[in-house]
Amino acid sequence: MVDYSPALMTDMYEYTMLDAALKDGTANRKCVFEVFTRHLPEGRRYGVVAGTGRILDELERFHLNDEDLKFLADRHVVSPETIKWLENFHFSGSIKGYREGEMFFPNSPILQVEGTFGECTLLETLILSILNYDSAVASAASRMVSAAKDRPCMDMGGRRTNEWAAVAAARAAVVGGFKGTANLLAAQLYGLKAIGTAAHCFTLVHDSERDAFESQIAALGKNTTLLVDTYNIEEAVKTAVEVAGPELGGIRIDSGDLAAMAQRVRNQLDALGATNTTITVTNDLDEYALAALQTAPVDSYGVGTMLVTGSGAPTCAMVYKLTEREGADGTMQPVAKKSKDKATVPGRKLAYRSYEYSLADAEHVISGSEEKLAGFTPEDSWKNLLVDFVDHGKADAQWRGHDAIMAAHDYRAKALAELPITAQSLMKGEPVIPTETTVL
């Protein structure tokens, strides 16, 4: 990636608001902002949180260099006084929220950012752009993994989206249950499993399919996966086993009636003695196509376009709203919008999930002042959904890096298993559990 400042990955009005607030004195007021979505994509039963680790990574680099400051000054985006304020900017507030891999529902307080108005408002666009996209990909990935019935799903969507989004999508896909990615930068940055062997052009550049297979096996070994649908699949499978022997690692099918072809190829491989050779299928798969392949003898899937576009829901419609601020007298005051269809619940939040017979039955969002929330006692069976990510400017390292991604990958499976089984239905429906909001 090119060198850039995440502090400029934002909307201009974040800086113009900061400029005005510094001039009138409100920039230093303590505030609590909250990220939530008013609704899930139509028909979806749940969402999966992803991207928090990326937010923490970007927060570490969230500052402006001399070139950035000159840009803001030359464009007259902010005043010289604000340029001075920005010279040594460092987020000193606190952030808590739902961990990556956690399920979320309408009005779940996915992230809460506490600090001064000036520093919190600068984070809005970056936080939303990361959470909205990453959570959309993770949510789609989770549905695909369920439909695949635990057969491994791999990300192959890099060429179907923006080059930076491809890296984010690969990470989010693993949070959502995928096992690896074809994107090498994502594999390098996050320690993910990388997959990939050859495309149709590799076969076409050789004088024959046999020559292509011999070349690939010579380079990668017999355990490689050969692409068999460039010409005639039956002939290609026969040639592949002749070249590699029954120890051939796998074959990939990228076209046609995938279920029918997988069945024919499986029977052919077994007849040729290649009983351990695996079958991977690709070609514009989504959760519905994966569900249709459940009875086919397929060992793994490569998913591209529908993964990186959220399978039709490329955003989670998350918003970032001020819910509490310091008043002129120094006390914290809950605030809320009253706009038609966009009203918000005032006050900072607690979030719990209740269970009956080991299955989640409701999301409980408790809102109120810091003092009232401190005195709130949840039911014994309620699980606290909020974890601390940043404490007065210091990020908790456990939520960043490869281990955090793998922990989120495992946690998603556990959290999904705790929801009613209708959560895994691909039929359109309401959120699988209700969100109950209490204002103290």
Image (cartoon, rainbow, N blue to C red):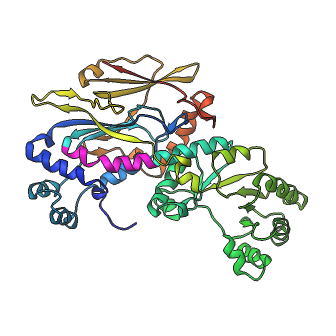
Is residue 312 shown to the viewer in this render?
A: yes
Q: Position of residue 260 (x, y in %)?
A: 81, 53
**Is residue 243 part of the magenta span, yes or no?**
no
Give residue 41's position: percent from left, percent from top. 50, 39
- Foreground residue, 23 or 416? 23
Q: Is residue 399 above or below residue 420?
A: below
Q: Position of residue 62 (x, y in %)?
A: 28, 55
User: Residue at the bottom extreme?
Assistant: 207
Question: Which quadrant of the rendered structure holds the C terminus?
Answer: top left
Determine the image quadrant of residue 333.
top left
Q: Which residues are magenta?
A: 118-133
In the figure, is residue 60 to the left or right of 189?
left
Does residue 175 appear in the picture of this structure? no
Q: Which residue is more in the foreground, 227 or 160?
A: 160
- How many tags in the picture? 0
Q: Please give the name of the residue rendered at 54% of the width and 29% of the height, measured from the top-left corner.
A: 430
In percent of the image, x 57 and y 29: which residue is there?
418
Query: Observer-nearest residue: 102 or 109?
Result: 109
Point out residue 239 in the picture as x, y percentages from the top left corner: 84, 71
Q: Tell me what residue is drawn at x 11 percent, y 57 percent.
A: 79
Residue at the extreme front: 340
Query: In the drawing, does residue 420 fall left or right of residue 217?
Result: left
Q: Residue furthest right?
A: 271
Whether residue 359 sits left or right of residue 327 in the image: it is: right
Image height of 242 relative to 319, above or below:
below
Classify residue 311 as left or right of residue 223.
left
- Image quadrant for the N terminus? bottom left
**Type of secondary structure dominating the magenta stretch:** helix
